[in-house]
Image: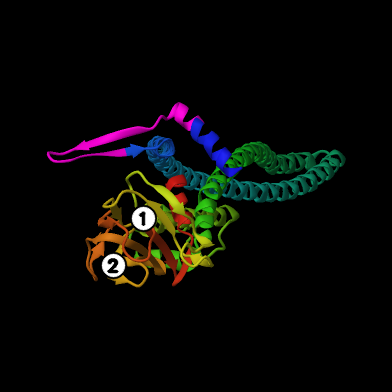
């Protein structure tokens, strides 16, 4: 049965692949190589598979190159957009701070003017009361005098003859103080009326100032709300980014604050009184905003010192992520404490932040290894290099060329193994890489 099937298959193959002979002739001998139909089929199949593999590999490389180029262009555009956004936010922050200071000054000036008006109003009220008291005294005196005058008139009417001359003199003498009192009374009444008019005008002006003060307070509240929203939108993502990276934000910001000499200006607390009074609610609110602005500035300084950058700037592809994976040699699962970048051998590798080189040599399993110590207890590692271009103790800057990609150490192909460690503990480097692409 097998012989018949083999004969049939051989007959079909001979129809499409007839037996061929390749003659090899020399000066003394002639030989030939016989190509059976099955041999020709195997050769054709192998050639077809090789050509197909070459086409697919070329397409993959082209697609990776195009995708990497688009990724870098998008990262550059995002970085430019965020820088512009930070600049605009900084300008708005300074403008809002100036507006808040000016509004607080206007508010204090209005309060001072209202205080003066209230003092004048109290003085006017006191003077009015004094005048009313004086008027009452004068009125009582006038009534007493008029009663005396009536009594004198009655006595004059009873006296006649020789007593008439004496009564006329008494009448003239009593009329003189009466006219003086009438004049004093008229002046006092006029002054009282003027005090009433001044008090009414002062009340109207005080009411107008109160309305202006209320409008100014509403404007201050609107400015404060806008500033508070802007600070919340700006500070929260940065704080979340550093915390996700496992970095101690409070200690990190304190370290930056100690090393930062550019304090002063709008970042200093606001004070509007030197008499030891408690700060107002607006002053405390403005100081909270200034503290948030200072925190945002410190975060920006800290981001410049942390490894928020990509170690590979040429076209590459990610071949292994952070976390547990299968060991290709042992078949078991083990922790992969970094990420792998695949690119051609000799691709330049760059430092992701400023720091000091603590290791530049061969490491077990890592091959040619470079370790860089950065601020805030952060360390980066670059493994499997083909060439190291830095030395131990050397200070490097972000973007400095530190070595070339290779396949040294325990590897299955050319790639870079990149690690980020915070306080000696490995963290996912993609937190920093994505932050560099999405935030900066």
Above or below 101: residue 59: above
Q: Is residue 296 visible?
A: no
Give the label on residue 114, or none.
none
Residue 107 image point, x, y percent: 54, 46
Give the label on residue 415, or none.
1
Above or below 248: residue 349: above
Q: Gap between marks 2 and 1, in whole Å? A: 24 Å
Depth check: give the residue in front, 402 or 40.
40
| Residue to which mark 2 is pinned | 356
Depth check: give the residue in front, 156 or 212.
212
Q: Residue furthest left?
A: 27
Name the image quarter holding the N terminus. top right
Q: Residue at x 75, y 48 (%)?
A: 136
Task: Say few, some or many: other residues with alpha carbon within 10 Å of mark 1 (under 14 / 14 to 19 / 20 or more).
Answer: many
Q: Is residue 352 left or right of residue 174?
A: left
Residue 342 image point, x, y percent: 38, 51
- The residue segment tinted magenta is 12-33
Above or below 111: residue 411: below
Judged by depth in the image, the label closer to the viewer, 2 or 1, is: 1
Q: Residue at x 52, y 49 (%)?
A: 231
Badge 1 marks a residue whose secondary structure is loop
Badge 2 marks a residue whose secondary structure is strand
In magenta stretch: residue 16? yes
């Amino acid at each position: 049965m097998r012989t018949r099937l083999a004969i049939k298959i051989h007959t079909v193959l001979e129809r499409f692949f007839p037996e061929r002979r390749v003659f090899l002739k020399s000066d003394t001998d002639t030989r030939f190589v016989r190509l059976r139909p099955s041999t020709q089929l195997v050769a054709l199949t192998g050639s077809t598979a090789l050509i197909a593999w070459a086409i697919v590999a070329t397409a993959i490389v082209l697609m990776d190159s195009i995708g990497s180029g688009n990724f870098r262009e998008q990262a550059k555009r995002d970085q430019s957009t965020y820088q512009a956004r930070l600049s605009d936010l900084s300008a708005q922050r300074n403008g809002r701070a100036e507006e808040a200071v000016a509004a607080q000054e206007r508010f204090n000036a209005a309060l001072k003017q209202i205080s003066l008006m209230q003092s004048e109003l109290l003085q006017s009220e006191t003077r009015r009361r004094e005048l009313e008291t004086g008027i009452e005294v004068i009125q009582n005196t006038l009534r007493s005098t008029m009663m005396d005058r009536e009594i004198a008139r009655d006595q004059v009417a009873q006296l006649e003859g020789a007593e008439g001359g004496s009564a006329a003199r008494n009448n003239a003498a009593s009329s003189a103080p009466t006219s003086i009192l009438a004049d004093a009374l008229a002046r006092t009444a006029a002054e009282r009326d003027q005090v009433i008019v001044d008090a009414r005008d002062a009340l109207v002006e005080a009411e107008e100032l109160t309305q202006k003060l209320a409008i100014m307070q509403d404007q201050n509240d609107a400015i404060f709300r806008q500033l508070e929203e802007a600070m919340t939108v700006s500070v929260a993502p940065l704080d979340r980014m550093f915390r996700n990276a496992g970095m101690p934000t409070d200690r990190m910001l304190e370290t930056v604050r100690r090393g930062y000499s550019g304090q002063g200006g709008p970042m200093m607390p606001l004070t509007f009184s030197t008499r030891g009074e408690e700060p107002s609610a607006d002053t405390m609110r403005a100081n909270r905003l200034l503290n948030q602005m200072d925190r945002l500035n410190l975060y920006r300084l800290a981001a410049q010192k942390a490894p928020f950058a990509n170690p590979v700037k040429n076209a590459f592809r990610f071949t292994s992520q952070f976390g547990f994976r299968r060991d290709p040699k042992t078949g078991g699962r083990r922790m992969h404490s970094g990420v792998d970048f695949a690119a051609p051998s000799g691709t330049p590798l760059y430092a992701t932040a400023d720091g000091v080189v603590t290791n530049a040599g061969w490491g077990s399993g890592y091959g040619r290894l470079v370790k860089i110590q950065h601020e805030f207890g952060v360390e980066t590692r670059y493994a499997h290099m083909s060439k190291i271009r830095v030395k131990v103790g050397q200070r490097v800057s972000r973007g400095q060329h530190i070595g070339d990609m290779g396949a040294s150490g325990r590897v299955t192909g050319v790639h870079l193994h990149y690690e980020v460690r915070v306080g000696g503990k490995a963290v996912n480097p993609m937190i920093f890489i994505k932050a560099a692409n999405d935030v900066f």
